[in-house]
Amino acid sequence: MSAYLVRRLIHLVPTFLGATFLAFFVLQIAPGDFLTQWALDPKIRPETIERMRHNFGLDRPLLLQYLIWLKNLLHGDLGVSFMYQRPVLEVVWPRIENSLILVGLSILFLYLIGIPIGIYQALRPYTLPDYVISFFAYFGLAIPNFFFMLILIFLFVKFKFAFGWTPFPIGGMTSQGFEQLAPWRQWVDILWHAILPAFVVVTADLSGLTRVMRAQVMEVLGQDYIRTARAKGLAERVVLYKHALRNAVIPILANIGGLLPGLIGGAGLVEVVANWPGITPLLLDALLQQDLYVNVGIIALSSLLLIVGNILGDLLLAVVDPRIRYG
Amino acid sequence: MAELRSETFLQSAWRQFRRHRLAMLGGGVLLVLYVIAAFAGFFSPYDPNFYTLNPPFRYAPPTRIHLRDPETGKLTRPFVYKVKRELDLETFTDRYVEDRTKRYPIYFLVRTPDQPYTIFKIFRWDVRLFGLGEEATREGARIFLLGTDNFGRDLFSRMVYGAQVSLTVGFLSVLLAMMLGLFLGGLAGYYQGTRIAIARPLLRPESWRFPARGGLGRRLLAYFLHGLALSLSFVFWAGLAATLAYGYWMLRDYSGALERVVFGVLMLAAAAWALSHALWRPLSFDPDDLVMRLVEIMAAIPFLFLLITLRAAFPMEMDPLATFYLVVAILAIVGWGGLARVIRGMVLSLREMDFVTAAKALGVPELWIILRHILPATASYSIVYASLAIPSFILAESGLSFLGLGITEPYTSWGLLLKAAQDGGFASFSDRPWVLAPGFAIFLAVLTWNFVGDGLRDAFDPRRRR
């Protein structure tokens, strides 16, 4: 197991290098750089721009810029944001935290809602509730999540006009007067704001998960060992929750690593619509401003999160399923 | 006597598909959507970029269609009134009020010589399914089924034209992604385990020789290819040496003492490795490794980030048509990996099958084996993949356009229309809900494609047959 883990971690290095180099390459073949827009300003002399370009290291060859970035990365230094004039990590990390709140809450929703619904459906297949839920699942798969968020905002704005208050806040991450709140109240406030966007982020995956869970439970319930368990007189509750569920849930846990990229990407559009100060709005800003190191930093950190998430998913799978052994 | 024939694979798949009621419904709706998109000019009352400043129609609500005669109260030919913009003195917002002096009947199959259109860019025509006619348009009467946008352009017409882009982007990019995925995935799977030399060692003259057989033409071709590979080897090694030297020379100025040592050692190791390959051992690679590492690297970057980063690599102001093809290409580049991975796995097992061995024994060329014997075996999976990938690509395009990184004016897509809806902030679209209509079009297209995809999956999967 630990040998496997070490092998995975070693394997992580070339992938990470490849991903960051790809990002570096793609970002640098874009015409112009951060200073190009300054060149239009008559108050700034061309020599000043050339000097700054030299100071930022933007006049060096691409490969060299990448190697230097890599060297600094080993020191825990992701470079300096041109736009904010601060270290990239200081700029990016709070945004990543914000996005992780959203994604974390989404995953929680996913399992807390998806698994029970899937089981419920599997126990009553081809009945009216089953069809109704399946119908909504199609609904959730097809609706673009940014559009869903727009509709919810629309409804809540209308609600607010009608009644003067809303059950959930519309947009943003914090209420007014957030700074004066006690720490735990601040957390409650953030979570309160996160519920709506997190639910929107998770709709598509939720629909997929209930379908998989339903199929899984139905398949497992048809197995011989379930018949055996029933035949020897076990209570239905035990049969279901102890024998069937544990096997049915395995492929769903196996998929946890595959979920992350979709959730991070899906959260992006919702962040933009709901004014959530996550990574994607920052990335969009930085891309437009050609703030190179912020862009590369975001892609490096998010791909690192992704790879680590995948490894954790595999480990989780090994813990849950004794049949899986990594030699 | 009737000939007894068993059902072919496609026949039974079609029979299964027809049983899937949702899939048939989805297919029907999709057919309608694609027909509307193809004949967009006919189905839209106005040109998508038509607007007037006088009279103004900025954010006009959907036009009320009257079915009853106001005097007698009886059913009559549907008609509309002219609307006039007024300033609401309480809220200081624009308000559109009907001017009930003259009725403008709605005509079907009406000619609009002032706004001609083309079908498939070839046939010019000016007959539209419905409209008020040229005269009424000149007098300032309009029919806006879904209101107007920030310029006062008819949203319904723009949605119909947006369908052209939104529905074809999904199709084209999936086609491209499938070509990439099938080709690279097939290559990776079929040649997994074989090593392809990219550069031949310089001190091993025996590896330069090329064992050519066959006629003169074939031998000449072989010698030509061999010569090409050899000269490429020289270029490759020279280029590598130059890069290393250049990199080392550049690094001198930029690193502290410790880093210089570390980098120096790394550089030396790389140089030694390159030299040993250049002189004695051929440098070769496994195509499977190359393709699959590339897939892994691309999968390590979140989908959306890769999408918008790739878009940002090109100038923001570009020719609109070029932007359209760029969006198609980007979607395909981001999307081919998943298919390639699965196709590779299938090909890996298919290449061990008896029919492939038989084809090899008969001397069938490898390319032909791949194209004719192996890839067709993956066809049913590929079709299902395509039908389920199209909706996700439609979603991706709408997301990209929604962020302002996709389709640009004067073209339009459903995502771009939603971007225009959202641009004014939360309060803006709560006053004019009709601007959200394009979202329902995306929803419908994605939903129906999903239905069709599910139907196809069930139809092609023998285990799911009922």
Image (tube, rainbow, N blue to C red):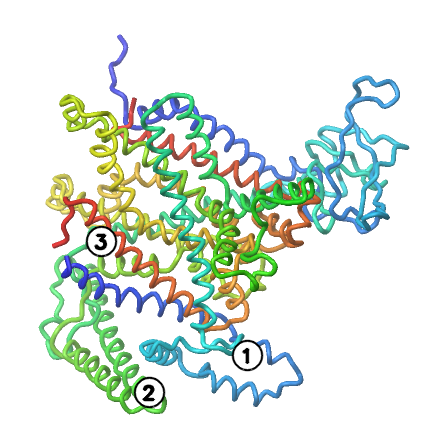
Residue A235 placement, left or right of B162: left
Quadrant location of the N terminus of chain A in the rendered image:
bottom left
The image quadrant of residue A308 is: bottom left
Q: Which residue is mark 2?
A: B251
B226 vs B25: above or below: below
**Mark 2 residue element:** helix
- Amino acid residing under circle 3: Leu
- In front: label 3 or label 2: 3
Q: Nearer the viewer, residue B57 or B126?
A: B57
Please report, as a chain letter, where disc 3 is located: A
Picture residue at 23% right of the left edge, 28% below the top: A221
In the displayed image of the protein, which residue is found farthest to the right? B101
Q: Which residue is mark 1?
A: A35
In the displayed image of the protein, which residue is found farthest to the top? B1
How crowded pointer 1 is (Cα within 10 Å; few <14, some 14-19, many 20+) is rated as some
Q: Nearer the viewer, residue A68 or B405?
A: A68
**Mark 3 residue element:** helix
Picture residue at 57% right of the left edge, 90% below the top: A47
Quadrant location of the C terminus of chain A in the rendered image:
bottom left
In the displayed image of the protein, which residue is found farthest to the left? B206
Picture residue at 23% right of the left edge, 32% below the top: A244
In the rendered structure, find residue A315 and report the number of the disc placed on it: 3
Residue B395 placement, left or right of A229: right
- Amino acid residing under circle 1: Leu
- Amino acid residing under circle 2: Leu
* Position in image of residue B395 (x %, y %): 48, 46
